[in-house]
Amino acid sequence: MTAVTTDAADGYEAVFDAAVAADERIEPRDWMPDAYRATLIRQMAQHAHSEIIGMQPEANWITRAPSLRRKAILIAKVQDEAGHGLYLYSAAETLGVSRDELLDKLHSGRQRYSSIFNYPTLTWADVGAIGWLVDGAAITNQVPLCRCSYGPYARAMVRVCKEESFHQRQGYELLLALSRGTPAQHEMAQDAVNRWWWPSLMMFGPPDDESAHSAQSMAWKIKRHSNDELRQRFVDICVPQAEALGLALPDPDLRWNEQRGHHDFGAIDWSEFQAVLKGNGPCNEQRLAQRRQAHEEGAWVREAATAYAEKHRHQPAAPDHPEAAQDQRSHVDRPTELQEATA
Ligand code: BYC
């Protein structure tokens, strides 16, 4: 961005503030405060990283899915998460960072991904619990992001949320089948819910009075609700769903509070959350090591895609015939898609 005088910057800032106040979208070429840009890059990168790291715990069960139907569904879901990563990295790139830079920060531990993906998937029922609770928490958090003030992020979220909604239902349906199955299957479903419930509540981030970024992000309309508001909404949604599933939520303090019109719930173990954030969760090391390895192993595909794109850049312009032009375009576009898919 070109340097501007203080007066001019004040003018730009006033335009930016007015756009946010009027619920207009900020677009990539609009002036924005440096801190707004940095906050978006931080959150969107963390979000993108979560999507691609989030593929690992579930992919763990693809080869062991109990039926062809379940396997096909799980493959599609894991593939969707890769797609979400791509939309989000692309949206983040509109802020002037490159995907390479973001991935480098993930791999070197300088940017975060969601705490939830540092827990292991021990049984098949964990695939259901992730769908129901983790994707359910993700939707609760992400639906308001469809109204985020930054246009590319908000638009990416629309499709992500539609897909997450399918993911949540497949998890719910999977758990329902187990819960209504044999006693051993029911027990497996209950055990998975016991292990995923509290980490799912932690996904919403620290309590409001300890959330470093919430106030500013809400003022900028990046976040529309606080961490505690969304956590409460999630708990209220899950209680009747757990009843319908015939599964218990592992919280003896969970009860309806008539006065508040919400469910009260027990204390979250924030020391566990902090430990996971510091890299000491059960799977932090494994997740990052696997991600780095996948990136290194994909280097040849990125190189081939770049060489292919370079070769076709020098080809003659597309002929006039629309179909031929379409063919020509698809040759030129493909390497870019390939690059994205393997980045
Ligand atoms: N894990 O000031 P705060 C998904 C960090 S779903 C790790 O409240 P903010 C998926 C936070 O970064 C998951 N770190 O932060 C689902 C900050 O540290 P830094 C991804 C966390 O940003 C199914 C510090 O704690 N979703 O992808 O205002 C299948 C203080 O927090 C966490 C998103 O990312 C956490 N849970 O609010 C596959 C949604 N929580 O950066 C994939 C978009 C907090 O100062 N993100 N921290 O070092 C958001 O909505 C917000 O970033 C958060 C946190 C609500 C998560």
Image (spheres, rainbow, N blue to C red):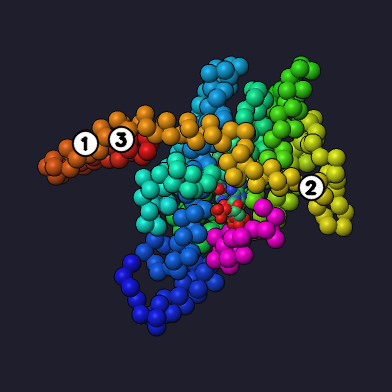
Q: In this view, does 267 lie above or below 32?
A: above
Q: Where is residue 299 in the image (x, y as percent from the top left)?
A: 32, 33
Q: Earlier in the sequence, mark 2 or mark 1?
A: 2
Q: Foreground residue, 301 or 178? A: 301
Residue lying at 39% horizontally and 61% vertically, measured from the top left: 28
| Secondary structure category for the residue under label 2 | loop
Is 216 inside the magenta-drawn segment?
yes
Res. 302 mark: 3
Residue hosting label 2:
267
| Residue at the image position 37 percent from the left and 38 percent from the top | 343
Task: Find out whether the residues at labels 2 and 1 contact each other: C-beta distance under 8 Å.
Answer: no
Whether residue 267 is visible here, answered yes or no, is: yes
Figure quadrant of residue 241: top right
Is there a contact, CB below 8 Å, between mark 3 and mark 2?
A: no
- Residue 122: where, in percent of width, then height? 65, 24
Q: Which of 55 and 169 is in front in this view?
A: 55
- What whole-number distance in Å separates the C-alpha atoms at marks 3 and 1? 9 Å
Q: What residue type is labelled 2?
A: Ala
Secondary structure found at label 1: helix
Q: Farthest residue in the bottom direction?
A: 7
Q: Mark 1 points at which residue?
A: 307
Q: Which residue is drawn at 54% across and 34% down?
A: 285
Which tag, 3 or 2, sits closer to the chain's start?
A: 2
